Amino acid sequence: MGLFMVDEYKMVIVVRTDLKMSKGKTAAQASHAAVNCALASKKNNPEALERWMYNAYPKVVLKVETERELFEIKYFADAAGIVNSIITDAGRTEIAPGSVTCLGIGPDAASKIDKVTGDLSML
């Protein structure tokens, strides 16, 4: 019987910093992304969702400076086959309606997500 590595599963939320959202607004937008990704995973990748839940729901929040960077990350997540969700604000409080605020990625294997987001900094 040999040792083997079991990949950790996580979710990443990538937030735009150029919108200058308050901490509360940022938390709400990140929460929307997490919920959307969990629901999408239930439908499209239930095994990843189950592994993520078993690992106590790890989430990491990272940052980009522009909407363009956010969509570049989304492109690579799509290409890697990772569940993801763009969040667009309704515009009821701090920012203009239709503003793209963040991107949820996963849950999926950390090694897979890190290939897409590994160069980004923590928020």
Image: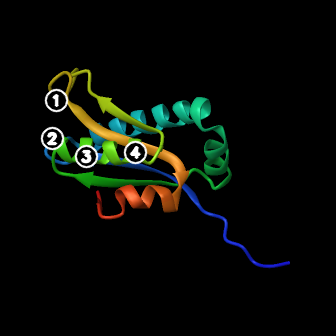
Identify residue for label 4: 79
Q: Nearer the viewer, mark 4 or mark 3?
A: 4
- Judged from the image, the secondary structure of the residue bearing numbered disc 2 is loop
- Amino acid marked by disc 2: Leu
Whether 62 is drawn above or below 5: the answer is above
Q: Distance between the Cα atoms at labels 2 and 1? A: 8 Å
The residue singled out by tag 3 in the image is 72
Residue picked out by circle 2: 19
The residue labelled by disc 1 is 95
Q: Position of residue 97 (x, y in %)?
A: 19, 21
Asked whether disc 2 touches disc 1, contact meaning CB atoms under 8 Å apart, the reply is yes
Disc 4: CA contacts within 10 A as few (<14), some (14-19) or many (>=20): few
Q: CA distance from mark 4 to mark 3?
A: 11 Å
Q: Nearer the viewer, mark 2 or mark 4?
A: 4
- Choose between 105 and 89: the one closer to the eye: 105
Q: Residue furthest bottom?
A: 2
Q: Looking at the rendering, in which quadrant would you find the C terminus?
A: bottom left
Q: How many neighbours does mark 3 have within 10 angstroms: few (below 14), some (14-19), or many (20 or more)?
A: few
Question: Viewer-proximal residue, 73 or 29?
Answer: 73
Give the class, few, some or many, for how many residues have Cα within 10 Å of label 2's Cα (few <14, many ≥20). some
